[in-house]
Amino acid sequence: MKTNWKLFIILLIASIFGVITIIPYSLTLQGALLQNLPPLYVIITSTIIQNAVIFAIPIFIGLNLAKKVGLGIPILEGWFEGREVKSYLKSILGISIGLGLIAGALIVGLDYLFSFAGVTINVTQASINPPAWQGFLASFYGGINEEIMLRLFLMTLIAWIIFKIKKTKEGNPKNAGMWLAIILAAIIFGIGHLPTVMSLTTLTPLVIVRTIVLNAVGGIIFGWLYWKRGLESAMISHFSADIVLHVIVPFLVLI
């Protein structure tokens, strides 16, 4: 098992950057709890240390399993190998941003439909609206950290397990197996949001369905991009979707 340590370090640094960028957004949402928090430099230092540990193992596993199931990080890999990658980056920008914007719009639309069924999340601090610049910075966390954890690690791991069970005669993962990995990773992502939702409202069957569906919609789109275009494409798309959710929609609500 040969690890690309340059790629490992870049992704680890990127994950730490993503966590730091979401701090202003998180602090604003915590509101009154700010008084009980330690100094900012302590928060940033502990954040860097904790996430260096939290993300190191998933990045290591993801990098070592991705190639075995036909997944990868083509732009960074090509860059480290001295290949020309600018044209490939240009080729994925349109579809990545476009699908990201569609994912964001779908999530907003589905949330609106669920509200008709009486499924709304009553946030106790709904009056607290982080400014657009904080929403913009927070979008880096979704684009970088969640894609590292959910696509590079979780989806890759699921695909590898499925690959071990069933593969084509040529030794490649079957399309059905890859789709299963995409969907399972997206559903697990949705389930992972249930504890947060539970702290805001009572969990009912419809609330559970809403939470899983809204989070899985983007996950399926980003998973497909990871499979077909590489991790960078999924990251760009996820970032674009979060811009819709954390910047554009809050701005439209205020005007």
Image (cartoon, rainbow, N blue to C red):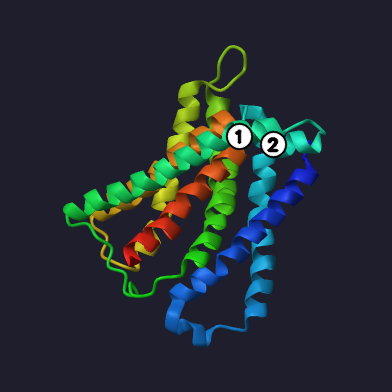
Q: Is residue 44 left or right of residue 241?
A: right
Q: Left or right: 159 with respect to 184?
A: right
Residue 75 marker: 2
Residue most extreme to the top? 169
Quarter of the rendering occupied by the N terminus? top right
In the depicted structure, whether residue 123 falls above or below residue 249: below
- Asked whether residue 184 is in view, the answer is no
**Local crowd at mark 1 within 10 Å, few (<14), some, or many (≥20)?**
many
Q: 21 or 46, which lies in front?
A: 21
Point 45% across, 37% down: residue: 221
Toward the front, the furthest residue is 255
Q: Position of residue 135 (x, y in %)?
A: 49, 63
- Mark seen at residue 239: none
Q: Earlier in the sequence, mark 2 or mark 1?
A: 2
Q: Looking at this view, is 180 or 37 the one in front? A: 37
Question: Is residue 205 shown left or right of residue 158?
Answer: left
The image shows residue 37 at horizontal and vertical percentages of 55, 83
In the figure, 32 relative to 12: above or below? Answer: below
Residue underneath mark 1: 230
Query: Which residue extends farthest right?
Result: 82
Q: Amino acid at mark 2?
A: Ile
Q: Position of residue 50 (x, y in %)?
A: 65, 66
